[in-house]
Image (tube, rainbow, N blue to C red):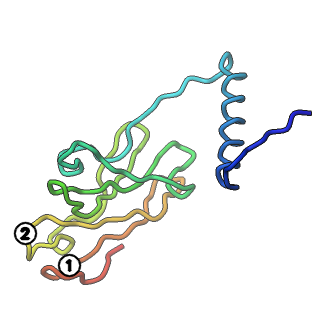
Amino acid sequence: MNTLFYPQINYSQRTLCYAVSVVSLSLACGMAHAAPYKLETLGLTDARHTHEDGHQSSYASGYLNLNEAGQVMGTSTRYKGANSHGRSAWFYNGNSTQQIGLTDADHNRNALDDGYQYNETRQLNEAGQVIGTTTRYKGAKKNGESA
């Protein structure tokens, strides 16, 4: 019997090492039988969602953000130059990503005329329907949320 030894690392690091070892072993043993897969860039990638240094930040994590049909929802950080400028909600239907959420005048920080918006996704069901919220503004101040 072989013993795995993890010197000078904490429990979570040990768990990660074990998980990586199992995944690596599974991949190495199953390569000849692996099903083909496709990598997709998820999230919004236009200029409004790109930091001035070129990086982009999108979030889609957890079981409520993915359904059996391969549809995914999430949010992308909005940028104005080097500054975070809110969030945009998006939905990936298996082929393309679309921005979703409310973007009318009530949901923009219009008093500052700066285009700031804040949308969040909450849950995706099997029919591809997304639940989320958008911040309402009255001038430059938050005025609640719309669902």
Numbered badge on residue 76 = none
Numbered badge on residue 113 = 2
Say whether disc 1 or disc 2 marks the residue closer to the N-terminus: 2
Q: How many callouts does the rendering have?
A: 2
Residue flagged by tag 2: what amino acid is it?
Asp
Residue flagged by tag 1: what amino acid is it?
Tyr
Residue 34 versus residue 108 in the image, above or below? above
User: Dot 1: within a 10 Å radius of its alpha carbon, few (fewer than 14), some, or many (20 or more) residues?
Assistant: many
Q: Quadrant of the C terminus?
A: bottom left
Q: Position of residue 23 (x, y in %)?
A: 67, 35
Which residue extends farthest top?
Answer: 32
Q: Position of residue 4 (x, y in %)?
A: 80, 39
Q: Is residue 33 left or right of residue 123?
A: right
User: Dot 2: within a 10 Å radius of its alpha carbon, few (fewer than 14), some, or many (20 or more) residues?
Assistant: few
Residue appearing at x 65%, y 20% in the figure: 31
- Judging from the image, what secondary structure is the residue with disc 1 in? strand
Q: Position of residue 99 (x, y in %)?
A: 29, 52
Q: Position of residue 65 (x, y in %)?
A: 49, 55
Viewer-side residue, 20 vs 50: 20
Tell me the quarter of the picture where residue 19 sits: top right
Residue 8 versus residue 83 in the image, above or below? above
Q: What residue is disc 1 on?
A: 137
Which residue extends farthest right?
Answer: 1
- Judging from the image, what secondary structure is the residue with disc 2 in? loop
Residue appearing at x 29%, y 47% in the figure: 56
Residue appearing at x 68%, y 49% in the figure: 8
Q: Is residue 25 left or right of residue 103?
A: right
Viewer-side residue, 52 vs 33: 52
As measured in the structure, the alpha-carbon distance from the residue carrying label 1 to the one carrying label 2 is 12 Å
